[in-house]
Image (cartoon, helix red, strand yellow):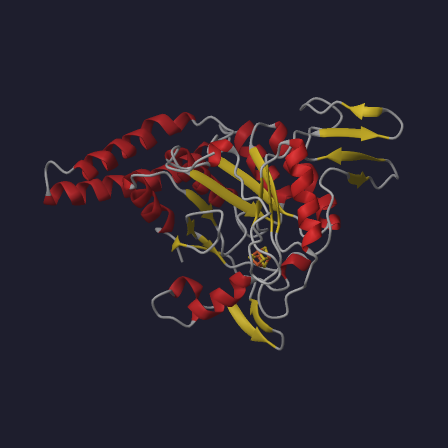
Amino acid sequence: MSGATKIEFCHMTVNPLVGCSRKSPGCDHCYAVTMARRHGGNPKTPQYHGLTRMSIGGPEWTGEVRWVPGVLEKALVGLTLCRTSKRVFICSMSDIAHEKATLQHLANVYAFAAALPRHKIILITKRPDLLLLRTRALMERLENFRDTWDAARKQLYDACNAAARARFSVNRDSKSALALQNKAEAIGILYADVRFPLKNVMLMATVEDQERLEERIEPMMELAARGWHTGLISEPMLSGIDPDRITISNEDGSGYNINALEGTAWDEENGELSTDLDGEVPAKAIEWFVCGMEQGPGRRLLDIRFAMARATECAIAGVPCFFKKDSYGRYPAQMPRHFPEWMLCDGEAK
Ligand code: SF4
């Protein structure tokens, strides 16, 4: 499924990767598996066939993760011709950093983002360690992965060219055909030497409780230190979390603390730790915090004061906070809905 969405922070979703497996308590009421189950019975959406099975507890993933050819290409053509910029959430029906997803899949998505610098691309994962591993590989050793990157570009280049040719065959002066031809040329030439990090991509990790925050914060702060835009999404927020005081414990008993809103780190013995890429802890502040309560049947209720406290901390630290909904599907007027400035689209006020 790709297209318009009810997800409040984006204009559309694009799903070139489908299928997943549960990772942590935030997956207990996964909406994607329910959707995939529904679409799996529809002959018009064959990409979902066989991705789920029924269990006593309801729909369950079979564990298959599938790349759907043509989805990114179709979205590229549409977004190239779109008059206004959009926030696009890629992979709402999977996890782009899933164990069974590949470096090629991630490269395909990054090539898509590089080809659409006007639009804001959002990726969300519960596996930021793998996202970091694969992103670092592309950033540091692109020459080793030249075939991967070129394959990613080629499918987009071919799609733009084909769409341009089809339009030219109907109208020799077609403006949309010209726009697509120009885009194909840019993909063919400009993005061969892509510069990572991509400035129109927001990488986010889901942190449903403090345990998951402690598990997942380090790769996100390293991605931030490497220059990527990074954020945290606490949806479903299952308990109070403290992004401004996260304790990282090592197996040898040592440890340190991180303030993810300020990008600082410290330990009890040495005080503040250096946080650049060569320092003790590669850590920079996250740029965006999204939170929202679980919805639907069997939802785990949470007092909205937990979210309000996070919103206040974000305001103090200058980190934009976006609150989605409370446990009853309501949007309380006092809760913020802010974006980092670069994520604002055409016609949106600061
Ligand atoms: S990672 Fe996301 S899509 Fe995958 S099972 Fe968990 S909630 Fe569902």
Q: Residue furthest front?
A: 333
As drawn, 71 above or below 227: below
Q: Which one is in front, 126 or 330?
A: 330
Identified at 37% across, 64% down, the residue is 45
Instruction: Name the spot of residue 42 as percent of width and height, x first.
Output: 38, 71
Left or right of 248, for residue 92: left
Instruction: Name the spot of residue 337 as percent of width and height, x first.
Output: 54, 44
Ligand 1, seen in the image, is in the quarter at bottom right
Left or right of 307, for residue 113: left
Identified at 45% across, 32% down, the residue is 146
Identified at 75% across, 49% down, the residue is 211
Instruction: Name the spot of residue 52 as percent of width and height, x first.
Output: 52, 68
In which quadrant is the N terminus drawn?
bottom left
Q: Which one is in front, 177 or 321?
A: 321
Can residue 190 be seen?
yes
Q: Residue furthest bottom?
A: 56
Q: Which one is in front, 276 or 73?
A: 276
Instruction: Name the spot of residue 86 as percent of width and height, x first.
Output: 39, 42
**Which quadrant of the view contains residue 322?**
top right
As drawn, 52 above or below 106: below
Left or right of 341, for residue 251: right
**Which quadrant of the view contains residue 6?**
bottom left
Can residue 51 be seen?
no
Identified at 60% across, 28% down, the residue is 226
As drawn, 65 above or below 214: below
As drawn, 188 above or below 301: above
Q: How many marks?
A: 0
